[in-house]
Amino acid sequence: MSRLIDSFWRAAVYCLHPRVIALSFLPLIIMTVASLGLGYLYWNDAVDMLRTQLDSYQLVSSMSQWLEGLGLGNLRLVLAPALLLFLAIPVIVITSLLFVAVLMTPAMVSLVGQRRFATLERRQGGSLAASLVWSLASTLLACIALVLSFPLWLVPPLVLVLPPLIWGWLTYRVMAYDALAEHASADERRQIFKEHRWSLLSIGVLSGYLGAVPSVIWASGAMFVAMAPILVPVALWIYTLVFAFSSLWFAHFALSALQQLRSRDEFMSTAGTAVEVPVLPAVPATEPLPPLP
């Protein structure tokens, strides 16, 4: 627990480092340009298609007529854009996580290693290709979990539990691997995953709940769809900072655990080495003196 708390406040302090702040703008710019560009090209078509699908459901038509009877017919026009924004949240969260993992995590792990673990040997137990395969496989599993659990999101308590848990698990899988890829060997990485699985998973889940903070921005965007071009970059920046913080948290925790593991292994190796005792040459026995006459 002490390592968990120590890594938390160290990650919070490192978020104020100029290098980390500068790195956070790269994925933000890429995602903002991509989201606004896709919105400009496909937003109206997607809204019209979704509105057509909604109108085909009798329940939605009855609800729309009921709202019109109450003088709230304008809410019907907001339903499709708001639902489209809601459906875009998982895609944006996963994309933000992957962009941070690819564009920011290696540089931030290197920063933590240089400033705090300068003497820690880098054994290169992971590679960029292995990291991409690991991240994509974990993302696929997370997407399957999101799709299967989506009907449960309609239950009010579960919508506050299931998405953060899934995002937290994905954060744990991606960030923990990248935090150890450069410094730990493959065996050391597996050992740390085994010994600290619940602590690493706790960091991921807590990061997932921190990632739910931008949902307030998205809720505002659902209420004020016209402000979406302004609210989307703000939400993306918050997502970037949250995942950057979680990456630093994993880096401090994992490298500290790696340092402890190597110190323990070195101590056990030293303690288990037998001390060689020099063998003295045998002293020949003296012949007994002849008896006195």
Image (tube, rainbow, N blue to C red):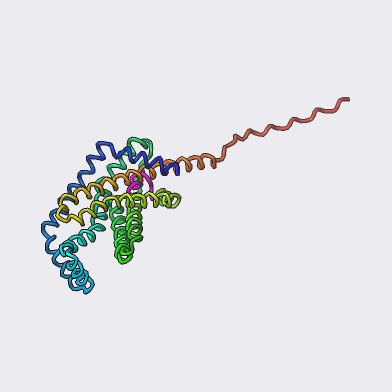
Q: Is residue 194 left or right of residue 112?
A: right
User: Is 59 covered by the magenta stretch?
Assistant: no
Say how many tags the image has.
0
- Residue 286 drawn above or below residue 109: above
Kindly identify the residue that appears in the image at 79 percent across and 30 percent down. 288
* Image location (x, y in percent) of residue 140: 29, 61
Q: For this rendering, which residue is in front, 227 or 150?
A: 227
Asked if residue 6 can be seen in this view, the reply is yes
- Seen as rendered, the residue at the extreme right is 293
User: Is 184 covered by the magenta stretch?
Assistant: yes
Residue 107: quarter of image: top left
- Seen as rendered, the residue at the extreme front is 70
* Image location (x, y in percent) of residue 201: 39, 52
| Quadrant of the rendering where the N terminus is positioned | top left
- Residue 54 drawn above or below residue 111: below
Q: For this rendering, which residue is in front, 225 or 23?
A: 225
Q: Give the range drawn in magenta.
A: 178-186
| Quadrant of the rendering where the C terminus is positioned | top right
Q: Is residue 52 left or right of residue 281?
A: left
Asked if residue 34 can be seen in this view, the reply is no
